Image (cartoon, helix red, strand yellow):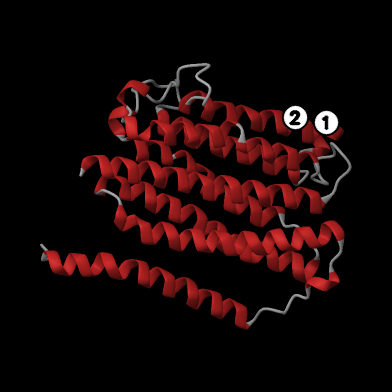
Amino acid sequence: MDLNPSYRKGLRMSAPILAVLTLGVLGLSTAAGDTYADPTQYEGLKLVTFFTFFVGYISMGAAFIFFIVERNSVADEYKTTMTISALIVGIAAFHYYYMRGAYVEDQIVSVHYRYMDWLITVPLMALKFPSLVGKDAITDAKIPVIGGFTNVCFFGAVWMIGWGFAGETGMLSEQLGDSAGLICLILAGVGWAMIIVAAGDPFGLMEPKGIDNSKVKGELEWSLNALRMFIVVGWIIYPLGYLYSPEANLLDGNQELMGVLYNIADMINKIGFGVVAWMGAKKATAAMA
């Protein structure tokens, strides 16, 4: 049924408030059963690891609220990209709470919680492109068996995460021996390359297979290239963290160094991804006025 304009406006204004209240209630309910973590019990890299888990949780939660609130400040065609931004950091905040808890209680940098998060949020990050530039800018180019742009990005993300998980949990060590971690890293890189080929690179070295740059609005060009920069350059931090994974058997295993690199990479890429998309959406919305 049709809602009158004033009622629709009331719903739009109340949505951010409900989001903030929901996050606050969840935070209070989880904190009620949480054990107080004394930072003074950590030293050196362990202290840095503890702080990056805590800052990651808080910053993701703050970004979630920001994107929900700002969703109403952009044109309708960009609301989906703001929703995806909020989902990415909101899901990450949930997992960071549990990763932080695992480190505080058991001194473990959880690989399993990390990959649960990535399995959901990385495909969502790939979906930022069509939600920002619009379906008209997405080409009809397809890869045999896999399909078009969205399928390529989704498949590439799942492929990348799957092989990364196999390498970091030692799933194939018995079959592949000491080379298992390196082989999994190389295979994961294939998925990363698939996303870059589909979305394009920020340096203009090749034409993207999945996006027609000529059909992208001028107001969105900077944001689109910034998203590409995150994928090509920002994501380099992740394989650096992988190198220190104890089970990957590449460099001297150090779970704290691995955790710090992953935490920094998540904060930069997940929050940054949403911010540059928001900037483009705001600029395009202003041009429509």
Residue named by callout 1:
179
Please identify the quarter of the rendering in which residue 168 is found.
Answer: top right
Q: Amino acid at mark 1?
A: Ser
Residue named by callout 2:
183
Instruction: Mark 2: give few (<14), some (14-19) or many (20+) Cα within 10 Å.
Output: some
User: Which residue is at a point 34% across and 46% down the rendered structure image?
Assistant: 282
Determine if residue 100 is in view. yes
- Where is residue 245? Give x, y as percent: 79, 45
- Where is residue 132? Give x, y as percent: 36, 39
User: Which residue is at a point 81% across and 45% down the rendered structure image?
Assistant: 247
Q: Nearer the viewer, residue 222 or 13?
A: 222
Give the quadrant of the C terminus.
Answer: top left
Callout 2 touching callout 1 (CB < 8 Å): yes
Q: How many marks?
A: 2
- Where is residue 201? Give x, y as percent: 52, 25
Whether residue 65 is situated above or below residue 194 in the rendered picture: below
Give the quadrant of the N terminus.
Answer: bottom left
SS at mark 2 in the image: helix
Q: Nearer the viewer, residue 87 or 40?
A: 40
| Image-based side of 215 in relation to 277, left or right | left
